[in-house]
Every structure is written in C-alpha cells, then in structure tokens.
Image (tube, rainbow, N blue to C red):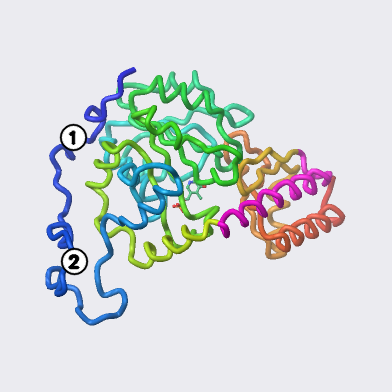
Amino acid sequence: MKFDLNKIVRKSLKGIRPYSTARDDFKGTASVYLDANENPFDTSYNRYPDPQQQPLKAAIANIKGVTPEKIILGNGSDEVIDLLFRAFCEPATDNVIIPQPTYGMYSVYANVNDVSTKSPSLTETFDLDVDLIIKDIDANTKLVFLCSPNNPSGNLLTEEKVKLILKSFNGLVVVDEAYIDFAKTDGFLPFLDQYPNLVVVQTLSKAWGLAGLRLGIGFASEEIIQVLSQIKPPYNISSVAQKIALEALGNSEAKEKWVTTLMTQREILTTKLLAFSFIKKVYRSDANFLLVKVDDAAHCYSYLTKRGIIVRDRSSSRHCDNCLRISVGTPDENKILIDTLTEYEKSTVYRS
Ligand SMILES: *Cc1c(COP(=O)(O)O)cnc(C)c1O
C-alpha cells in the first residue's frame, strides 16, 4: 500500500504557519535582548526556553542513532500522543485502532479529541491478532497504537506482526516503546527509514528515572516531525527540563545500572511470586513490571494497601481477570512485598 502523508494531515492544518517566536526571527547571538517582553533581571530562568530544544535533541540523536530532524520532544509522551491526534485525526469523523488491553492514555486522548476508537483484542498471550486489526481498518482510520513492551502485560509484540501492519496500513502506526530499555531488543528505531508511516514514542519517565520531569520523545520521518513541530506549543519543554534531561543523558552509566538491577530483580521476583499457592500465573515480562494472576485480586490488593503497599489492580482489563500489575522496586521494596505476601498466604483471612 502506498503511504501519502498529505492524505492524512488534518485539513485545517494545510498551510498553517506556526507561531513565530521572537528567537526564531533572529538567528545568532545578541548582547541585548529586548524582543520578548521578558524580565531582564537574571533569575536563571528569566528567558524563554529554546523552542527547538537543539542541544537536547542532538544528545538524544547521538544516543539513539537517528538525526535530530527525526525527533520531536513533548511534555511527556502524553503530549506527543495528543499531537498525533491533533495533526492527523478529523474530530467526529476519523477513528483510531487501539488493541486491548493496553495503556489507557491512547483512548483518553482519542476521547478528548472527539476521535472514535476501535478496540480489537490482543490474543490470550497479549500478542497482535493481525487479521482482527486489519479487518477494523477503514477509510477513516488514521492511527494504530501498538505498545511494545505492552502495558499492562509486559511482553514485546512480535516484530514480524508489527511489520505486517506497517505494510498493510496507509495511516500511521505508533509504536510506544516506553519500556524498551528493559527488553533485549533495539525495538523499531532501526526501521524508521524503511517505513514512512512509522512513529516510535519513547520517554525519559521509566528507565531514565525522570517521570517527574515530563520528557517524551517522538521519532518519525522528517515530514511527519515537521507537521508535529508546527502545531506543538512553542515552549512545551521548560528550560529546567531541557537542562536536567541533558545532564541525565550525559550519564547513561547510571541508567544502565538501574536497568540491569531492575531486570535482575524482575527475574528474582518472578521466581518468588510463583512459589505462592494463591498466585496462578506470572506473565513473562520485557518491562519493569509484572502482571500477576492471583485467585482473588481485590482481596489481595486491599490486604497490600492496608499494609502500605500499592500495586495496580488490572482485573477490569481484557484477558486480565484477577490480575495485579506490580512494578519492580528496589531490592528492599521487593523484599517487603514478598514478606507481606508470605504473611498474606499464612493469614487466616486468606481462604484457599
Ligand atoms: C509510563 C508510560 C508512558 C510514559 O508516559 P510519559 O507521559 O512519558 O510519562 C508512555 N507509554 C506507556 C505505555 C507507559 O506505560
């Protein structure tokens, strides 16, 4: 199928001119800035941030092996996802495909943007059912959201199946790789040039330990990135976020160490959880969390909550009956979890 970006850009955006910031008009360095109505007295943050975030994009480009022109930064991946709806979906007309169960924000932003959703099921093992997805595609389908490793199940989607969807769909395939650092694969960035309809979304919120900073990253062709850059708020990444992200990216050893520890802890936790009689299944995870099937999720959840341990009850999601989603914590936190579950198993409250 032939992919034509012009056919999927929202009509109202054709010919749109982005807000031109004061610093866009004048390129170079000046000694006196009287162009943006800023407070001239130095607070370290009295100037507006770089709207194009050039040094930060250069650092990300270097780490990820893509050119900076193929990168857009958002206030969290959330903003990148919202921009995709606003750039490519006509409200009240278009639809998107969100295989379930998956991350909740795709349908939140679909609803906010008045875009309808189709929700084919993933298989029982949380992989793609390609036929089901392709059957759902119609003339108004603009985006397909694939999350790999998937939240809440933790597994990578089969690469060949994702490629099949990329080849058979002439809208955008968004592959959300928030957890890719915890998987033993490079994910889809190496295929960016091969598929003009591929968008990869990553984040500094998980492996990089910066959820509070709000820094999401979209990777796609230069043409797609240009469209998104035209509609993004010019100052969406604060000076503080740009500065701290740049520092963090300069210390990738710290990230590697956390990732190694968390992957080891994930395997230790899996083994220990499987030993409990009330745990029916621990799904194989390529992420920093585990989906765990217990015999009574609500009961187990409330036992943990009363003892100050918060996990996520995912029981209402498709194929997730009685499933808790548990993030991998520090070794100490994981020990507290296991000790508490040991008491839970022994407790008279627990009825087998
Ligand atoms: C946690 C998570 C994100 C991260 O979102 P941010 O807005 O970047 O913090 C993105 N996608 C999925 C599937 C997630 O689970």
| 268 left or right, relative to 203 | right
Q: Amino acid at mark 2?
A: Thr
Residue 126 lies, with reference to residue 300, above or below; the image says: above
Q: In this image, 105 relative to 29: left or right? A: right
Decide which of 48, 350 is in the foreground and name it: 48
Task: Please tell me in which quadrant of the rendered image residue 8 appears.
Answer: top left
Task: Please name the residue shown 25% across and 42% down the image.
Answer: 226
**What amino acid does circle 1 point to?**
Lys
Assign the C terminus to one quadrant of the image.
top right
Distance (Cα) linking label 2 and label 1 = 37 Å
**Residue that mark 1 sits on:** 11
The residue lying at 66 percent from left, 43 percent from top is: 291
Taking depth in this image into account, of 222 and 345 the one nearest to the observer is 222
Residue 315 in percent (x, y) is at: 62, 42
Task: Using the rendered view, name the quadrant where residue 286 is placed.
Answer: top right
Q: Which percent across, then down, holds residue 193?
A: 37, 31
Question: Is 263 contained in the magenta span?
Answer: yes
- Residue at the spot of label 2: 29
Where is 349 relative to 105, above or below?
A: below
Q: Is residue 208 magenta?
A: no
Q: From which residue to which does the magenta span run? A: 253-280
Q: Nearer the viewer, residue 94 or 206?
A: 206
Q: Count the marks: how many? A: 2
Task: Point out residue 163 in the picture as x, y percentages from the top left corner.
Answer: 47, 25
